[in-house]
Image (spheres, rainbow, N blue to C red):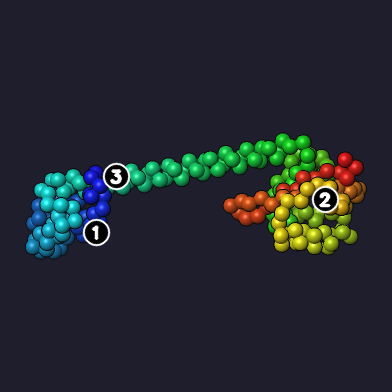
Amino acid sequence: MDSHDSRFELSPREYEIVRLASEGHTDQSIAHHLGIGEGTVKTYWNRVRAKIGPYARPEIIARVVRHEAEAVLENLRHQVRCLQAEVHEADRVDDATRAILEAPDAILIVRTDRQIELANDEAALLFGFSRTELERMDLDDLVPRRFRSSHRGLVATFLSDPHRIQMGTHQSTPALHASGVEFEVHASLGPIGSSEGLRVMCIVRRASE
């Protein structure tokens, strides 16, 4: 469509008149179908010509149909672009998840409510729980009961100013194995932005390592 054609905007009634004409209706038939006078139909045709151009009716109909078809096509292109972006994002997330699951260190992805969202096999090995069990647990469950209150305070302090903390730059943290045995761990922390909000990546190692 010519560039000037792409700018016209017909009212719903004007579109309806053009559509009926494209189906072979005369002005008299259009008037009867819409319940208006034949003179009113002619007035609408004059408005259509003022917006599209002084063309014969077949040309006006062709331009309107082409305009609508291109609008539908552009909408489909937009939907395809959105789907491609979603697929790309899903692939990116899958790649990131795969990297976490295959990492040689124990890794936990934790929500701001301290709920563990993702754990890899090394984390399961370190804490003695299965990955499925870890992903149903609160971070508190991995801390000895007597230290949980202070640990929550440390977590709250971190969340008030999320930033990367390198392993070894803070003191070790008491941890709790599934067997009930306590041990010390070092952790590096890093905030991760996501469509569902802030997440924290915790890379954990035994303090002896």
Residue where numbered disc 3 is placed: 70
Nearest to the eye among marks 2 and 3: give it. 2
The location of residue 139, given as percent across then percent down, is 78, 54
Number of other residues with Cα within 10 Å of mark 1, as a class: few under 14, some 14 to 19, many 20 or more: few
The three-letter code of the residue at mark 3 reads Glu
Does residue 170 appear to the left or right of 12 in the view shown? right
Number of other residues with Cα within 10 Å of mark 3, as a class: few under 14, some 14 to 19, many 20 or more: some
Q: What residue is rendered at 25% in x and 56% in y?
A: 9
The location of residue 175, given as percent across then percent down, is 86, 50
Does residue 153 appear to the left or right of 4 in the view shown? right
**99 above or below 17?**
above
CA gap between label 2 and label 3 equals 60 Å
Mark 2 touches mark 3? (CB < 8 Å): no
Q: Earlier in the sequence, mark 1 or mark 3?
A: 1
Q: Give the SS element for disc 2.
A: loop
Residue where numbered disc 2 is placed: 169
Number of other residues with Cα within 10 Å of mark 2, as a class: few under 14, some 14 to 19, many 20 or more: few
Q: Earlier in the sequence, mark 2 or mark 3?
A: 3
Res. 36 visible in picture: yes
Residue where numbered disc 1 is placed: 12
In the foreground, 104 or 168: 168
In the foreground, 34 or 49: 49
Give the mark count: 3
Res. 16 visible in picture: no
The location of residue 181, given as percent across then percent down, is 91, 48
- Quadrant where the C terminus is found in the figure: top right
The three-letter code of the residue at mark 1 reads Pro
The three-letter code of the residue at mark 2 reads Thr
Q: What residue is rendered at 8% in x and 61% in y?
A: 38
